[in-house]
Image (cartoon, rainbow, N blue to C red):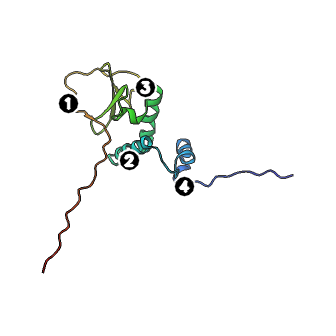
Amino acid sequence: MTTRVDVKTRCSWSASNPLMVAYHDREWGVPLHNDRKLFELLVLADLRRRGFSVHQLHAILDVLKDRFATRLFDATGGGGSVRLLTDGREIYAKTARGELYNLLRTPMQPLLVIGDEGLLKDLSGKVRGRKRRKRTLNQS
């Protein structure tokens, strides 16, 4: 009697980190048909483009789920209990009570805010359509 060992073929980028292996096995290459998940993917892609690492994005998602019991969709315009803000370098969560948390450095301790929060901008996903050019017929 022989035993069969199932070995998954994975991309090389996922081999170095257990979080990346889990992401590769559960999410990578799986078609999305859920509007909320597609929206979250757009927000994550935007954050990635802004310079946040994949590790930081996973940490943000984990904190939102574990600390605030919410998803990225709800925190970026879906009417959740927290709102995400950014200054371009960090991601913050602002609760309905006005408490502000740095999701990457101290997600369990509210920050002491002195002064105005004017430098922080809402982190929200927006899908914009492209402007269509008017076609003109060349008349000779």
Tell me the amino acid under the disc marked 1: Gly
Q: Is residue 102 left or right of residue 70?
A: left
Q: Give the Cα distance between marks 3 and 4.
A: 33 Å
Q: Please report contact status of discs 1 and 4: CB closer than 8 Å, yes or no.
A: no
Give SS at disc 4.
helix
Q: CA distance from mark 1 to mark 2?
A: 25 Å
Quarter of the figure with the C terminus:
bottom left
Give x and y (percent) for residue 6: 70, 51
Q: Which residue is mark 4?
A: 12
Q: Residues within 10 Å of mark 3 (few under 14, many from 20)?
A: some
Name the kind of residue labelled 4 in the image: Ser
* Element class at badge 3: helix
- Amino acid bearing label 3: Phe
Query: What x and y, as percent, mark residue 85?
Result: 30, 33
Disc nearer the start of the sequence (1/4): 4
Instruction: Tell me the residue at 34%/35% (across/down).
Output: 76
Residue closest to the eye, 20 or 73: 73
Q: Residues within 10 Å of mark 2 (few under 14, many from 20)?
A: some
For the point 32% across and 18% down, which residue is it? 97
Where residue 56 sits in the image (x, y, percent)? 42, 39
Point out the frontmost of discs 3 and 1: 3
The residue at which mark 1 appears reads as 118
Which amino acid type is shown beneath numbered disc 2? Ala
Q: Residue furthest top?
A: 97
Q: Which residue is mark 2?
A: 45
What's the distance in space between the residues labelled 1 and 4, CA to CA?
A: 42 Å
Marks 4/2: CA–CA distance? 21 Å
- Local secondary structure at mark 2: helix
Q: CA distance from mark 3 to mark 2?
A: 22 Å
Query: Dot 4, crowdedness within 10 Å: few (<14), some or many (≥20)?
Result: few
Identify the residue at the far right of this view.
1
